[in-house]
Image (spheres, rainbow, N blue to C red):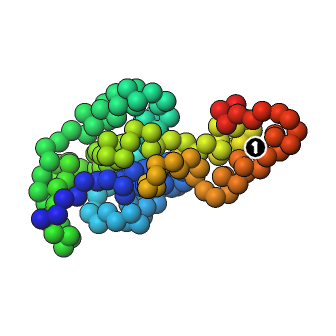
Amino acid sequence: MHLNPYGEYAVLLAASLADDWPDDREGIVDRTREFGMTMEFPTGTDDHARTRDVIDRWLAVVDAREERVRAQLLNALMAKATAYPRLTDHDGEGWHLHYRDDGRSLPDVLLAVMSVGTALHLTTRGMHRLARCEAGLSSGDPCRRVVVDTTRNGRQRYCSVRCANRAAVRRHRARRSGQSVSARA
């Protein structure tokens, strides 16, 4: 048996959906496949809208600035997704744990996977390792992408090299003009 902790891949899947929302249910399912989920999901007519709600509630966790608030929001998500952990052996993956009941809808499965995965990510790596791209915190910068910090040193602040470079240029120009630049402006 291997332990499937819903760790990093679940948080990266949530960030991917938040940053690039699919147009339809099939796009969401395709994204789950890209991140290694092999199970089939029963089809519901409201799966697209309900999954968007899951992502929006997950983004509230991302945007929480205080650890206690972040923990409360995440606890509420996990409570809503509550199920008994269960052993499963589907799709030739070997025995592993699921943190959800069998036969659940796409939004219900994603709620369980993303909330447990986020909790594991934050408690094992640090409560500060999930945020919005710091470039977007500067006045006029449009970036609102999610940063899932999986780096060794725990200091990832930007979603991409492009955003990091844009912020560095902004700081350089501010220094040259004698102004102070604040990433939180």
Q: Closer to the camera, 163 or 140?
A: 163
Residue 40 x, y percent position in the rendering: 27, 62
**Residue found at x 86% / y 35%:** 178
Residue 46 x, y percent position in the rendering: 38, 45
**Residue found at x 55% / y 42%:** 132
Quadrant in the rendering for residue 170: top right
Q: Closer to the camera, 153 or 58?
A: 153
The answer to whether any part of residue 23 appears in the image is yes
**Residue found at x 70% / y 54%:** 165
- Reading the image, the residue beneath label 1 is 171
Q: Closer to the camera, 47 or 137?
A: 137
82 on left or right of 182:
left
Residue 140 x, y percent position in the rendering: 75, 38
Q: Closer to the camera, 7 or 23?
A: 7
Residue 59 x, y percent position in the rendering: 47, 39
4 on left or right of 61:
left
Q: Residue furthest right?
A: 177
